[in-house]
Image (cartoon, rainbow, N blue to C red):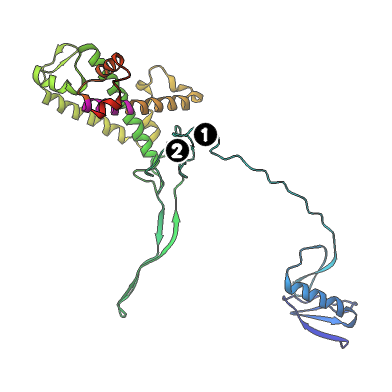
């Protein structure tokens, strides 16, 4: 090599300050003196293949134009620590599900009280909101190009929220389904209790109660009421309709489901530590009552009898009077 050779650099480097030592670096080039030719060729080959990561020491100095140059001064042997992979337990491990080894949907992560992973039709799956570009209309070319999807958004799932208005909130989100489940469950608990008590006290089954009211007149606990069945239906629609409108007028979902006050005369929900336990207990009773009400309806359609009459018939011959024999006949 001549005394001073100009070699293109694989990456731009700014000018180093003047020094009494042989010049090494010029903007965009490396000036290699004869005594550094071997070292320069090695550095150029290494830098063209991969970035240098084993440099532990560096000498830095500032150029006159504000640039900064870092030159390697040595390497240090590093010891790679061995890492042990620790398997984390599955978040669903030990979780109660509606069926053994049932596949739990991704949107049911157990964060909501009473979540047992049951949503076979995907009603509670959160909606994905898409943002589209504006359509491009070219009237001269008679082309109307539809806009493409440029982003997507999924709202975060929370427990029954106390926030009245939430952006991108769904009308039938999983929170709304939970509210409907609790309300339907409460009606089912009243209906099941009423069907059993009325049949046990009067002998009239729940499916024949309306027929008796039409034929014998309306009565309550043996007392005749001065209202026809039509008048009672109108009063029920007006009263219950007002109650439902008043309940839905409350924007706070938590208060809409758990109003407290007169609806908690014993103050059971005053203890915040026990509130979740009470909510779970109510939800279990709601689900059991809804299944019971469905069973009452199936029994009435299949046998024409009430729940207590069917229970008595089953106890009289438990091995030959079952649901299998009933539906087979």
Q: Which mark is residue 117?
A: 2
Q: Nearer the viewer, residue 214 or 170?
A: 214
Residue 326's x, y, as percent?
26, 26
Q: Residues within 10 Å of mark 2 (few under 14, many from 20)?
A: many
Say if the magenta span includes residue 298.
yes
In the image, residue 175 sits, relative to residue 200, either above or below, namely: below
Residue 108 location (% of width, % of height): 46, 41
Mark with earlier residue (1, 2)? 1
Main SS of the magenta part reads: helix
Residue 95, numbered label: 1
The quarter of the picture where the C terminus appears is: top left
Q: Residue at x 44, y 56 (%)?
A: 152
Residue 146 drawn above or below residue 252: below
Q: Nearer the viewer, residue 325 or 247?
A: 325
Horizontal side of 56 relative to 159 (left or right) equals right
Query: Is 75 left or right of 123, judged from the image as shown?
Result: right
Query: Which of the labelled discs sits on residue 263, or is there none?
Result: none
Q: Is residue 129 above or below residue 50?
A: above
Horizontal placement of 78 versus 160: left or right? right
* Image spot of residue 76 (x, y percent): 85, 60
Q: Residue at x 85, y 86 (%)?
A: 4
- Residue 219: x, y in percent? 15, 15
Q: Quadrant of residue 135?
A: bottom left
Location of residue 182 (image quadrant): top left
Could you say whether the residue bearing mark 1 is in a helix, strand or loop?
Answer: loop
Spatial CA distance of label 1 from label 2 is 9 Å
Q: Residues within 10 Å of mark 1 (few under 14, many from 20)?
A: few
Looking at the rendering, the stretch of residues picked out in magenta corresponds to 291-302
Asked if labels 2 and 1 touch by Cβ distance under 8 angstroms, the answer is yes
Residue 93 visible in this rendered orientation of the protein: yes
Q: Residue 19 in magenta?
A: no
């Amino acid at each position: 090599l001549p005394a001073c050779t100009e070699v293109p650099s694989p990456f731009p480097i700014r000018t180093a300050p003047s020094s009494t030592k042989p010049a090494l670096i010029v903007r965009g080039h490396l000036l290699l003196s004869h005594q550094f030719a071997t070292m320069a060729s090695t550095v150029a080959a290494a830098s063209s293949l991969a970035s240098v990561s084993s440099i532990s020491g560096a000498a830095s100095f500032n150029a006159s134009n504000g640039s900064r140059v870092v030159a390697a001064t040595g390497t240090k042997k590093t010891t790679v620590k061995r890492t042990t992979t620790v398997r984390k337990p599955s978040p669903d491990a030990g979780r109660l599900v509606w069926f053994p080894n049932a596949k739990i949907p991704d949107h049911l992560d157990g964060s909501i009280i009473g979540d047992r992973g049951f949503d076979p039709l995907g009603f509670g799956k959160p909606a994905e909101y898409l943002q589209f570009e504006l359509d491009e209309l070219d009237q001269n070319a008679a082309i109307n190009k539809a806009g493409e999807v440029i982003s997507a958004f999924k709202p975060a799932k929370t427990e029954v929220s106390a926030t009245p208005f939430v952006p991108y909130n769904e009308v039938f989100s999983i929170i709304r389904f939970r509210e409907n489940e609790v309300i339907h469950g409460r009606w089912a608990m009243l209906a099941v209790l009423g069907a059993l008590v009325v049949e046990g006290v009067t002998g009239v089954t729940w499916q024949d109660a309306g027929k008796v009211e039409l034929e014998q007149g309306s009565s309550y606990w043996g007392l005749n009421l001065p209202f026809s069945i039509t008048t009672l239906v109108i009063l029920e629609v007006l009263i219950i309709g007002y109650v439902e409108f008043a309940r839905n007028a409350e924007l706070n979902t938590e208060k809409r489901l758990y109003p407290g006050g007169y609806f908690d005369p014993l103050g059971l929900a005053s203890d915040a530590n026990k509130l979740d336990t009470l909510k779970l207990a109510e939800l279990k009773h709601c689900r059991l009552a809804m299944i019971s009400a469905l069973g009452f309806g199936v029994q009435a359609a299949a046998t024409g009898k009430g729940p207590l009459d069917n229970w008595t018939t089953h106890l009289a011959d438990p091995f030959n009077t079952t649901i299998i024999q009933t539906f087979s006949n």
